[in-house]
Image (cartoon, helix red, strand yellow):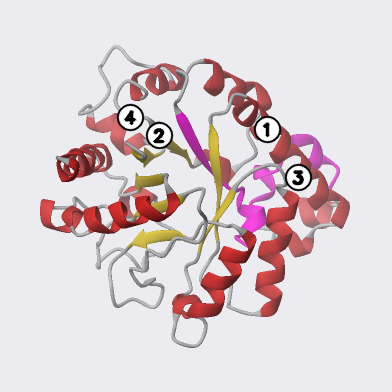
Amino acid sequence: MAVLCGIAGWADKSLIDSKLFYPLSVKSSIDRLRFYTTQFPLVEVDSTYYGIPKPETVESWAAQTPAGFTFDVKSFSLFTNHPTRPLSLPPDIRGDLPANLRDKRILYAEHLPEDVVDECWERFRGALEPLRAAGKLAAVFFQFPPWFLPSSRSLAYVEQCQERMFGFQIAVEFRKPEWLDDRHRDGTLAFLRTRDIPYVAVDVPEGHATSMPSVFHVTSPKLAVVRSHGRNHETWDLRGVPPNVRFRYDYNEEELGQWVPRIKEMERSAGRVHALMNNNYSNYSVKNAQQLERMLEAWQK
C-alpha cells in the first residue's frame, strides 16, 4: 500500500505513561523505536522542532530501524519563525552569542547574526544526513505559525527554506487560514506545485481563528501528507500547554472514515501518502492510526 500510517513522536510521555502501547520491558527511547517499527511503517520526529539533534542520535535511528521504515522530521523552530529558547541552540553556538542574546528568554532568527543562522541550518542538515543517506527520510515538515501571513515576502522565505534544504524533500503546513481563502488559495497551491512542495493537509477543530480548511489538494507527485491534530474545541486555542493537553482527542470511526476517500484520492495523484496522527494523549494516536490503517486496507477490498 502506498499509504503509510503512523504517529507524531514515538517517545511521547503521555503515550509511555499510558502503558497501553509499549511492553513494560521496553524502557529506552531506542528500544521504543525498535518496538514501534513492528507496529507502523512511518513515524514523525517532533523532537527536532525543539532542538537540533546530534548526528550520532540520528545515526542510531537509521541503524536501529528496518529497511523500508520511513521518517518524517519536523523543522527546528528557529527556521519557521517560532520563538526559540537560547538553550535550544547547540551549546557551542549559544556560547558564542553576545550576552544580550544569550540571556534572552526567547529568540527569533531575525535577532541572530546571519552567520549564526547559517551555521544552525548547516548543523540541521548535517544532523539529518544519516537518515537521508540510509534512504529512510521522506520529508522535512515546515509548520509555519499563525503570524506567518500570505505575502510575496513569505513565499520568498518558503523558497529560501527549500533552497537551504537542497537535497532534502520539504513539505509545508500553514496555520493561518488566509493562505487558503478565496483570495489566496489558487496562488498558494500553484506556488507549491511550481516548487514541487507537498502541502500538508490537516484535520483540526473547525471554526477557530487558526482552523485551516480541510483542503487535501496534492501539490507534488512525490508525496502527499495528512496530519490529524484532533478536534478538541475546548483546548485548541490554549497557549503554553503541552501537546497532550491541546491535542487530546480520540477520533471515532465516522470521523476517521471521512478521510479514507480523501486519502485514496490523494494516493491516485501523489502515489505516496503519509497519514500521521498528532492527537497525542494516552494511546489515542496509535489506536487511531491503527484504525485508519485498517479502514484504508478494507477500502481496497
Q: Are the residues at dot 2 and dot 4 in contact (C-beta closer than 8 Å)?
A: yes
- The residues colored magenta run 70-97
Nearest the viewer among 31 and 185 is: 185
Q: Nearer the viewer, mark 4 or mark 1?
A: 4
How packed is label 4: few (under 14 Cα within 10 Å), some, or many (20 or more)? some
Pointer 1: what residue?
127
Say the numbered circle drawn on residue 42: 2
Pointer 4: what residue?
40
**Secondary element type, mark 4:** loop
Q: Earlier in the sequence, mark 4 or mark 1?
A: 4
- The amino acid type found where label 3 is placed reads Cys
- The amino acid type found where label 1 is placed reads Ala
- The amino acid type found where label 4 is placed reads Phe
Q: Are the residues at dot 3 and dot 1 in contact (C-beta closer than 8 Å)?
A: no
Check the picture and name the quadrant holding the C terminus.
top left
Q: CA distance from mark 1 to mark 2?
A: 19 Å
- The amino acid type found where label 2 is placed reads Leu
**Secondary element type, mark 3:** helix
Q: Residue at x 20, y 29 (%)?
A: 20
Q: Quadrant of residue 106?
A: bottom right
Q: Nearer the viewer, mark 4 or mark 3?
A: 4
In the displayed structure, 60 sits above or below 242; it is above
Nearest the viewer among 244 and 270 is: 270
In the displayed structure, 242 sits above or below 201; it is above
Q: Give yes or no for residue 92 being in the magenta stretch.
A: yes
Q: CA distance from mark 3 to mark 1?
A: 10 Å
Pointer 3: what residue?
120
